[in-house]
Amino acid sequence: MSKTKFLKKNFLNVSRGITLISLIVTIVIMTTLAGVGIKSLTGSKGLINQAKTTKTAAEMKELEEQIEVELIRAEMRKDVTMEIIIQELIEKNLIDNESQVDKETGTITIGEYEMEEKLAHYVITPGEKYYGNKNIVPTDSKYFSFSVNKDGQTATISGVKDSYAVKTSYKGSATKYTAVIKDGTTYVKDVVIPYEYVDSSGNKYTVTEIGNSAFGLKDSSSWDSEISNVENTFTSFTLPNTITTIGNSAFRGTTTLTKINIPNSVTSIGSYAFAECMGLPNAINISNATTIGGGAFQKCTTLSAVKLGEGLKNIQNTCFSECTNLNNINIPDGVTTIGISSFSHCTSLKKITLPDGLTSIGYGSFAYCSNLNVINIPNTVTAIEQLAFRECINLKDIKIPGSVKNIGAQSFQDCTGLINVTIEEGVTTIVGTAFGRMYKFKHNKYT
């Protein structure tokens, strides 16, 4: 920078500083003359401080969503405390200081806006959550149908009562849609699942399961005009911590769903349970689930982070396929197989670590993950199936251990960025098209 330019820039900065000081002095003098004291301007509740914290409704909504994501991410870690979370929120400029958090209720206050129980929602004491707390009044229980389970003590919430379900005609037959609850002229959007079912005789049953297709559309291709024109379909579900099983297609196709807690009590998630829930929260913790069905989170395009648990043995077919925002997922120790297209088209996924003990990488399991650039293949894998990594165009290096006996057709085809391939001794079959159309390929090493 020349001396002239430097002086000019400094002069402008000084001028701006003088102008700003003059403006502040003028404001103080005018407000004082108008009867407004200095304390009213500069105190913790003063006009200047309020101006700093005042935000538009849109800004508050965006800030609340950012805080929500951070809290869910925090829950995905071990040994997290309220103090740690508060510090992280401060470091990320989501709050200014810890005085904005009421540590007894978990309420976060920003200006005059209160985010009630946001922290208590996730951090109270180990094992307790506000979501699923039995003190939540199940105000929506009148809408639901239940069935008593075989044990005679628990119940499944099987869906919406006929009197509240939207019914239409499709191809000449009556269809009951359970992605919408209609109460008179009102569409219910925020649903609290009761933890207890009381039958007509007064018998009480603990609600442990959400049944197959309980709230999901049976067939999204058969939506009729009443449903497609409704804006206030389900936006949130609060599940009690008595729920252990979420059934097949339980919430499938509920595209307006933006908030749902999956309690730590859940151990089983059925096939397509949340498929096509395109507004699902950014991060979810399902670390206690030991069974997750095929397609369970398929096309959940807003989902960016998932926490899986060590009790999980298999990742089923298409489980997370087309989750185009997914960029953070752990595959825990204990998983032995990754199914067909389980992560295909996860275009934001950049790195994934496969666990020791994994034996099979399924057909098309990571195909079309266009941003994937780091992948390890543990020496317990015996098969890389067809199309496993097809068109992973940012993958540059790959090492295939000798434990792999078969590398399937097109498994690395169209990996146009792949430069180095190391194949260890022991690999017996490489199908001819396995490494087809790798235009930058330079080095193939056998060890």
Image: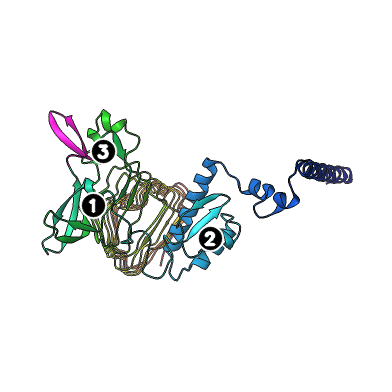
* In the displayed structure image, the side of residue 16 where residue 138 appears, left or right: left
The residue closer to the viewer here, 100 or 277, is 100
Location of mark 2 (residue): 101
Location of mark 3 (residue): 183
Q: Nearer the viewer, mark 1 or mark 3?
A: 3
Q: Nearer the viewer, mark 2 or mark 1?
A: 2
Q: Position of residue 146 (x, y in %)?
A: 16, 52
Give, as a three-letter code, the residue at label 3: Asp
For the residue labelled by badge 1, is the local secondary structure a helix, a strand or a loop?
A: loop
- Whole-Å distance between the Cαs marked 2 and 1? 39 Å
Q: How many marks?
A: 3
Q: Position of residue 321 (x, y in %)?
A: 33, 49
Residues packed near mark 3 inside 10 Å, few (<14), some (14 to 19) or many (20 plus): few
For the residue labelled by badge 3, is the local secondary structure a helix, a strand or a loop?
A: strand
Residue 26 vs 423, above or below: the answer is: above
The residue closer to the viewer here, 125 or 142, is 142
2 or 1: tag closer to the N-terminus? 2
Q: Quadrant of residue 126?
A: bottom left
Location of mark 1 (residue): 271
3 or 2: tag closer to the N-terminus? 2
Q: How would you classify the magenta stretch by its main secondary structure?
A: strand
Q: Position of residue 313 (x, y in %)?
A: 27, 65
User: From which residue to which does the magenta span run?
Assistant: 162-182
1 or 3: tag closer to the N-terminus? 3
- Whole-Å distance between the Cαs marked 1 and 3? 29 Å
The C terminus lies in quadrant: bottom left
Residues packed near mark 1 inside 10 Å, few (<14), some (14 to 19) or many (20 plus): many
